[in-house]
Image (cartoon, grey):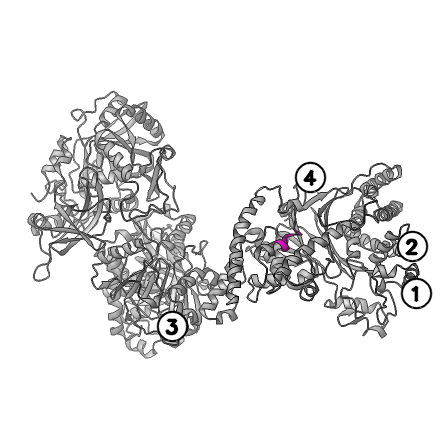
Amino acid sequence: MSGRVCTSILQRASCYTVTLSFSSSSQYVHPVVYPSSHLQHTQYCRLSTWSTSRRARSCCNLKKAGNGSQKGRKLSTRQDLDFQLSRVQINGILRSNEQTVSVPEFDGRGLNAVRKFESNQLAANTPNEDRRSAATCLQSKGMLFGVFDGHGGWACAQAVSERLLYYIAVAMMSKQSLEELERCMEHGRAVPPILQWYKHHTDFNYRDSASLYIEHLRVFWQEILDSEEHGDGMSPSDALACAFKRLDADISLEAQVPLSSDLMKSTAIQVAFAGSTACVAHIGTDGIHVANAGDCRAVLGVREKDGSWSALPLSKDHNSQNQAEVERIKAQHPPSERNTVITDDRLLGVLMPLRAFGDVRFKWSLELQQSILASLESGGDLDSLNLYQYIPPNYLTPPYLNVAPEITYHKLRPQDHFLILGSDGLWDELGNEEAVRLVGEHLSGIHIQAPVSPSEKQMKLGQMLELLLKRRARASPALDSNAATHLIRHALGTGEYGDLCQERLASMLALPEDLARMYRDDITATVVYLNSDLAKPHHN
Amino acid sequence: MALSPVLLPRLLPPQTGYRLAGRGLWTSPHLFTVSGDSQLLPLPGQARVVICGGGIVGTSVAYHLAKLGWTDIVLLEQGRLGAGTTRLCAGIVSVAKPISIECKMANYSNTLYEQLEGETGVKTGYVKTGSLCLAQNQDRFISLKRLASRLNIYDCFFVMPEYRKLNLHIFMHFLLSLYFILFLALSHLPSLFLPCSYSGVQILERTTVQQVLVEKGHVMAVETDRGSIECEYFVNCAGQWAYELGQASEMKVSVPLHGCEHFYLLTKPLQEAVPPSTPVVIDMDGRIYARQWHGGFLSGGFEKNPKPIFTEGRNQLEIQNMQEDWDHFEPMLTSLLRRMPSLESAEIHQLVNCPESFTPDMRCLMGETPGVSGYYVLAGMNSSGLAFAGGAGKYLAEWMTYGYPTANVWPLDVKRFGNLQSSRTFLRHRVMEVMPLLYELKVPRWDFQTGRQLRTSPLYDRLDTQGARWMEKHGFERPKYFVPPGKDLLSLDQSKTFYKPDWFDIVGAEVKCCKEAVCVIDMSSFTKFELTSTGDQALELLQHLCANDLDVPVGHIIHTGMLNERGGYENDCSVVRLSKNSFFIVSPTDQQVHCWSWIKKHMPSDPHLHLEDVSWKYTALNLIGPRAMDVLAELSYVSMTPDHFPSMFCKEMSVGYANGIRVMSMTHTGEPGFMLYIPIEYALHVYNEVMSVGQKYGIRNAGYYALRSLRIEKFFAFWGQDLDAFTTPLECGREFRVKFDKDTDFLGREALLQQRQDGVTRRFVMLVLEDHDTELDLWPWWGEPIYRNGQLAGTTTSSAYSYTLERHVCLGFVSPPPGPEGLPTPITPDFINRGDYEVDIAGQRYPAKAKLYPFSSLFTQQKRRKDDLELSNLQGK
């Protein structure tokens, strides 16, 4: 009986949702007003603002973000009894990190290969260890999108997410622009902006370390200026490779050098000892460059001639499933280590991704690690840094890890419609084809599903009808206007017949903090819609 | 029976059956085997008839031709006999069809199949089951009652919702009739026909027709992938591919049909096997049908959102690999399980995708094509192939043998369409409407919504902004009525009714204006031909074709029928003698193709005799009403009074600034007024002038509904609705338009003379409904049974509300019961005048007064030479 009451409550709640979503959908009518636009704002982050806001408390934004997710949890605990949430609550949780940005086709400097992007995150860790970045290069061409999956805390992912795009943009800048930049810095003039950032209100910066970061970025461009053959700037692939390696080197360096403030020092240590994978796409009118280190993934959505969607992965996962990657690592170490380098599908039995930023424990020599940790211990900082004192087993011939990205280039074609960047939390739940189909159908509004499978045809008529109704519900206009939310909803809520199962979704979201990570990972998804019309002149 | 490929071998009849029965050339026992390596028969170099298509339709034609004594028939099939739609069809033969010719065909098929099974021993699983037709709402119930009343079914009864097993809702009624539906269980139905066919039929499988060669407008040969066959006749029974085949001919032949996917479900046998005698359940509101199948059910439907296929044309291989689409089937499955919840536990055997071909008006395509003589078509069965194949094959065989079939097949005649319906886009859009329509509620005067605004008058936009509501005939938009400004009619869906429609008062006002002032109706859709010659060939031809005397002074208009050898109307038209040797022929809109080919067929090939279709050159405005003469007089400075411009005359004159307007003193309604035939570039000018001058006479726009009301209350018969190729002028009181004593021996004269001597056995009458409440009672439409003294005596052909009589008027034919030996009895005026008549509308009979003449009071305003003559000449006096 109680079950029935429960169902009726759920049903009533769902009715309520319908009316609610109708009224709220009026928001979407204005093309310039994005869903939850009050939550999201585009920031021009000039280098100069870093220096002025130095006094601001570090991580204050982080706390706010933490509170935000706490609020979501509280909603869930109210219904702990059955792990069920109402549709309103589900939508609230799913949409709190939504971001939608439309990009003008012509921004005064040139045509844009990106029409729009939509992004979302759902945390399983508390706080979230995934990060995302999106920015337009103002001094060079194209847009940059990054997805960063942190491990051992969020510190490294945070630092990479705010710094990497600058490194890439700077590497692509022409010598002339860099000289101008340097002159401004030298004379204390306002520097021309390098990037136009698109940030969500929960995204934040390490304000205390800003000056350090600028300083090291400046060193980077000075070195570029010193090099002879820079000229027009690096090609995107060179810039990506160079920026990845340079930033990781800087992270490593910052943890070793004495720093002026304790706060800065502890941040640098946390960043270096934590780790982060990264998948960054540079999208220009000529094509897409993807640099990947780790197990985030970039997948291109391609519309075939018959109108169906297919997936073209633009990156390879660097994990133990990737045999070439495993071989690469084994080859870098003596044959005696062949059986210990990768154990239990992990690097030295510890680390899942096989390439990453930070993670100095897998990069530094034992002596260096010990001396740094010792100096910290003497300073009494170690406890506050929450660093575990451990050495990976069989740590014989470091480094075991680097961040050199694998770079792919894809020339933009008319049939290429969007690019999905996702952290492994997304790809654990969805296959490439499934994700592309979901976004493709979300984009076109046409829902082509895989036909009912032969095994399903063994069902009885009643069961078949039930399945068909679910399939129809799934094919009916999407609940989310944001494709990234749409992906996350389906990643978590897809039932055994490939249908969207409300109960499953509700229980996945209602998991208490301590359990959530056992059932799902942090999920970040960014869907970039391409201006595939631009590709037409290049075609044929 | 619908058959999955797996089951095919299992149900093959024993081979001995073939050998035993096979008398002809096709004795190959491999004929129906699945293996593809059987020896191909050599292709004959010539044949009398080549039939393309080895489905049930093609084989039926072959069978009936052979039966009528034809020999030298070759039937070509690109794949296997009965491998296309026929193999997959659901195997239901319904005899409850919307029009009588279809009922006749289905009835005949039904009898034939039963008889053939006995003759040939081919086990078809033929069972008479009857059916349950469900109505989920009152309107559907009415339409079922109308159907029952029309089919004259008495052994039907209505059951109320207690019938639990079918999970009925309120408002659910049943119509159960044992003679409604039967079904066949046979995969390769064509084989039914084969053992009986005479030795004249040769069947060649795996032979693809590539094109039909034409010489001098006549079929000469058929080119196949295995060589060509010279032939006199070609029959296109290619089903789905008939359109493409038509296009592939040397002279393109228009076969307007388009394929749609059609799905049905097969269940495994239920735990408690469904007995074969279980009636077919038809729930049109739920858009489904269901029948017994191997102890389980077969259920399909006609969904709202059909999937048209083969728009670009495909080959036959693909018809067998059609994809099932469960998601598409979901609404029908929902419907089925709502109706029969116990089927929830039934197991799925298969979902079958069986493409069917549909035509622009839901009726099949039959007959000789207009452009190529000897080229016949039988296709476009609208998913009733099984029901129609027998009867349609018979009629087509008769047509080929005698030159005409033994029943009026005009509603199915391929000549009702022209090239204009041959656009692939049009067909695709139209069939998407047609397929759902099969199960949709059809109320009086519904119109197609797709494929519209193809042909329009130059005044279309002017009229549209003035509130015109449109109907379509032969692709031409015609105004129904004009919604006055500020008045809103119900939306289309809501105005669907079997009762008094919402336009009642609007049309009433238009009629009143026609009677008292003047109205203008755009009647540009009429078919208009000009026949000219250097000598008197034109007159000679028309004197031969027309029953009336065309040798009249220049400027006279003659109403005349063009009759066939049997005296029946092939066309009913008005002919104007423009000059000594040129004639202007105005025919009904849908005669454009038929009349053209009828005249062409009888026209000597004489370079000095010229027929031209000028339909598109003229905009026709009908000025109806007593003040029409005032309007025209003012615009032309010519007196238009009957003294100066008597009725049934035509003059070329100026109207406004425009010169060369053909003004004719006739209105097609019996009301005073004029038809203006205006060269299209003047149309807008003349219309504007007429409207502005007419203002002071109270002019207004009117539409065809007003016209219909006017013509029906005046007892004017219209060809296509009331008159057909089986109706003679004597039967409809038009002997005065037949000039037996004119110099030329016209077509049909012999037959009419004979009929005059024998007496007519049916008579066109006018029935004025008494005791019928316009507000509360169901309205008549057409096809209602007429009873005389309680006995079925005929059927109505058209009806309208007469605003003058304030009564409904039905037109229709009645005939006395057959004599003692079953011979038809001649009808007498007494039979008409001395009977108590009733018209049955959906089972309710309304007393009616039968009349042979229109109410003379309606003509009092007119004292015209010609009309007096017409009245005094009425037959039966």
Q: Nearer the viewer, residue A20 or A494?
A: A20
Residue A36, disc: none
Residue A367, disc: 1
Cα distance between the residues tagged 4 and 1: 52 Å
The answer to the question of whether label 2 and label 4 lie on touching residues, with beta carbons closer than 8 A, is no
Cα distance between the residues tagged 3 and 1: 80 Å
Counting residues from the start of the chain, the first of labels 1 and 2 encountered is: 2
Mark 2, secondary structure of its residue: loop
| Residue position for label 4 | A107
Q: Nearer the viewer, mark 3 or mark 2?
A: 2
Chain for disc number 3: B
> What kind of residue is marked 4?
Asp
Instruction: Read off the magenta span.
Output: A92-99
Mark 1, secondary structure of its residue: helix
Counting residues from the start of the chain, the first of labels 2 and 4 encountered is: 4
| Residue position for label 3 | B296
Do circles 1 and 2 both sit on a common chain?
yes
Q: Position of residue A123 (x, y in %)?
A: 69, 58
- Please tell me how crowded label 4 is: few (under 14), some (14-19), or many (20+) other residues with Cα within 10 Å: few
A538 to the left or right of B232:
right
Chain for disc number 1: A
